[in-house]
Amino acid sequence: MSQIAIRGRARLLGDNINTDDVVPGRYLNTDDPVELATHLFEDFDPAFGASLAAGDVIVAGANFGCGSSREHAPAALKQRGVACVVADSFARIFYRNCFNIGLPIVECPGAAAACREGERITVDTAAGRVKLEDSGCELQATPIPAFMQELIAAGGLIPYVAARLRAREER
């Protein structure tokens, strides 16, 4: 299994970004990620949501993804093409939901304070390293365990299980 290396443009957010900040609750009558992605950060900061581009890395403070336990928020981020979320810490259910849908996230205390908006960032998920390319700052993050990297590589829990079942049937 290969490690996941991510390179992108850092997009900064603060502490306690909840799942309703990511996708407002009034849109949760659908589970279509394409539709949900059109409403990212709509009430929180519409300019931020509209400016997110494929390959961007969200860098946030503490407790990212607090609030509801719905998978809508990580699904919308993944659909928009967010390559990774790096935060000081994550709400536990959001953390697991991201892996379940195949969105890489990395806990890295101090990343939000050290990073500048738009800075080039490289995330080595296996080693748990976050490098801020413009400033040269390197931070130690929590490495993503091998099993969780397999979930991401497969595209999430459901594709991972489906592939395992197919492999079992082929034996």
Image: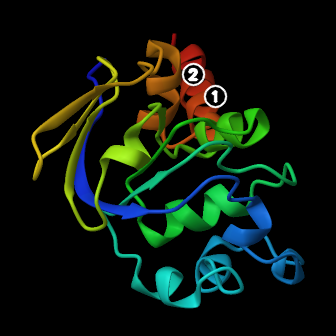
Quarter of the image for residue 100 reads top right
Instruction: Identify residue for label 2.
Output: 164
Query: How many C-alpha atoms fall within 10 Å of the one at disc 1: few (<14), some, or many (≥20)?
Result: few
Which residue sits furthest top? 171
Say which of 108 and 2 sits in front. Answer: 108
Disc 1 from disc 2: Cα separation? 5 Å
Judge from the rendering whether residue 25 lies leftward or rightward of residue 135; answer left or right.
right
Is residue 63 positioned above or below 44 on the image?
A: above
- Give x and y (percent) for residue 101: 61, 46
Mark 1 in CB contact with mark 2 (< 8 angstroms): yes
Query: How many C-alpha atoms fall within 10 Å of the one at disc 2: few (<14), some, or many (≥20)?
Result: few
Judge from the rendering whether residue 137 lies leftward or rightward of residue 13; answer left or right.
left
Residue 61 badge: none
Q: Residue at 34% of width from left, 22% of height from top?
A: 128
Q: Residue at 85% of width from left, 74% of height from top?
A: 28
- Give x and y (percent) for residue 126: 33, 19
Q: Secondary structure at mark 1?
A: helix
Query: Quadrant of the image for the N terminus?
Result: top left
Say which of 13 and 143 sits in front. Answer: 13
Is residue 122 positioned above or below 125 on the image?
A: below
- Give x and y (percent) for residue 37: 59, 77
Identity, as a three-letter code, of the amino acid under mark 2: Arg
Quarter of the image for residue 22 reads bottom right
Q: Residue at 72% of width from left, 85% of height from top?
A: 43
Q: Secondary structure at mark 2?
A: helix
- Give x and y (percent) for residue 160: 56, 31
Is residue 35 positioned above or below 151 on the image?
A: below
Quarter of the image for residue 91 reads top right
Instruction: Identify residue for label 1.
Output: 161
Is residue 113 positioned above or below 107 on the image?
A: below
